[in-house]
Amino acid sequence: MAAAAGALEVAELQRRNKELERAAAEGRGREAALELELERTRQRLLATEEAEERLSGDMGELEAESVLQAREYLRRIDALSHRLAAALDLLGAAGLHLSPESNPIGFE
């Protein structure tokens, strides 16, 4: 009877050992899948960081270009304003004075 109880105990331990081995193998499989997913996430993060750096550089270049364009437009507006003032002075010296009614732009 003791031998039969011992055999049952051994059989139970073997069954339990197989269950634990199966659970460990499943755990290793899940761990490998998670490690793979982690590596993919790292690669996406790296790609995102590189894209962010490129975009930041592009934005800096565009900002610098827009500042240069704005300065050029202001310079042209200033030059045109001076030319217009000189033309109005010349007209005034010639005795021609523009009234607001004859000047839709609003210059006098």
Image: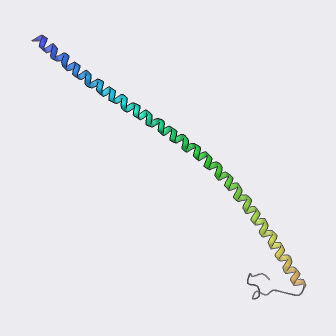
Q: Is residue 78 left or right of residue 26?
A: right
Residue positioned 84% across, 74% down in the render:
83
Q: Is residue 72 left or right of residue 63?
A: right
- In the rendered image, the quadrant that contains the C terminus is bottom right
Residue 98: x %, y % from top left: 81, 86
Task: Give 99 or 72, whichever is nearer the viewer.
Answer: 72
- Looking at the image, which residue sits at the far right? 93
Count how many numbered circles sit on residues in the image. 0
Task: Give 19 or 75, whichever is nearer the viewer.
Answer: 19
Residue positioned 13% across, 11% down in the render:
3
Occupied quadrant, residue 31: top left
The colour scheme of the drawn protein is rainbow
Residue 82: x %, y % from top left: 83, 72
Q: Is residue 108 left or right of residue 10?
A: right
Residue positioned 76% across, 63% down in the render:
72
Q: Is residue 71 above or below residue 55?
A: below
Q: Is residue 23 above or below residue 9?
A: below
- Looking at the image, which residue sits at the far left? 1
Q: Is residue 101 above or below residue 62?
A: below
Residue positioned 78% across, 81% down in the render:
107
- In the rendered image, the quadrant that contains the N terminus is top left
Q: Is residue 11 above or below residue 100?
A: above
Residue 65: x %, y % from top left: 71, 56
Occupied quadrant, residue 38: top left
Residue 76: x %, y % from top left: 78, 67
